[in-house]
Image (spheres, rainbow, N blue to C red):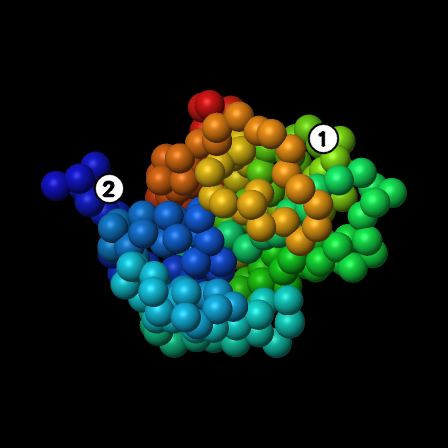
Amino acid sequence: MTDIESAATLTGRSALVAGATGGLGSAIAANLAARGATLTLIARDQRRLDGLDVPGHRVSLDLRDPDSCALAVGAAARHGDGLDIVVNAVGVVAFGPVDDLSVDAMEELFMTNTFVPIMLAKAALPSLREGGVIVNISGVIAEKNLPQMAAYGASKAATRSFDEALSREARRRKVRVIDARPPHTETGLADRPVEGTAPKMPAGLDPAEVSAVICDAIVGAVTDLPSSAFGS
């Protein structure tokens, strides 16, 4: 029996994972499944969803559309006979100086990295059962922004700020909000920027190790996951 399986305390819990085909989203989905959760997996590409080696109900949606956020929550609540966990692992990145960044790239950064977490949380809160959890991944850049990534960092810092206030609002519903800020992780995201070219970066963390920290936090009573919680 693996360490994850021995800690399978999520049996009977319904989890929605947005961005389930990404490097970190797929690792989180696999970890939650190993702990016994009933999964609803959301991503834009149906073919990549179908190829995901994780058990769960698959729904292809573009969460940049507010109606799709509501559809995702409804699908998860039906499939899992309720909703307990929402993990938002959707994200995009762009590189380069601000004066080279297009307005389209700026809009995409904030729509995906900031507005999707807000819209998904808004859709999920009325459906989450008592003891539910919302996880947003703002990342280490929300703690200290970097040149050549200014707009990207700002979009993630906005999510961290949102989570800080949302956690106080959600507390009244007995729902926890976890803002996760892992250091650079080898998800492949840096190789798919919406604009620009990634600078040379040191080797990142293993997505499986990052997902284990996040899922341990879901099972426990954690309300914040700073970069220091992940080691390096």
The secondary element bearing badge 1 is classed as loop
Q: Look at 70% across and 50% down and name the residue there.
A: 195
Pair 1/2: label in front: 1
Query: Which amino acid, by three-letter code, is at mark 1?
Result: Leu
- Dots 1, 2 in contact, CB < 8 A: no
Residue 62 at x, y = what percent?
A: 57, 70
Q: Can residue 127 be spotted in the picture? A: no
The answer to which of 122 and 112 lies nearer the viewer is: 112
The answer to which of 221 and 110 lies nearer the viewer is: 110
The secondary element bearing badge 2 is classed as helix
Q: Look at 41% across and 70% down and name the residue there.
A: 47
Q: Look at 43% across and 62% down and name the residue there.
A: 16
**Residue furthest right as drawn:** 99
Residue 227 at x, y = what percent?
A: 54, 29
Q: Which residue is mark 2?
A: 4
What's the CA distance linking mark 1 and mark 2?
A: 35 Å
Q: Badge 2 local density, few (<14 within 10 Å), some, or many (20+)?
A: some
Residue 125 at x, y = what percent?
A: 55, 62
Q: Earlier in the sequence, mark 1 or mark 2?
A: 2
Q: Can residue 58 be spotted in the picture? A: yes
Say whether residue 122 is left or right of residue 231.
right
Q: Is residue 172 above or below residue 181?
A: below
Query: Which amino acid, by three-letter code, is at mark 2?
Result: Ile
Q: Is residue 186 above or below residue 30?
A: above
Q: Which residue is mark 1?
A: 146
Query: In terms of image quadrants, where is residue 84?
Result: bottom left
**Residue furthest left as drawn:** 1
Say whether residue 28 is left or right of residue 61.
left
Q: Badge 1 local density, few (<14 within 10 Å), some, or many (20+)?
A: few
Q: Which mark is residue 101?
A: none
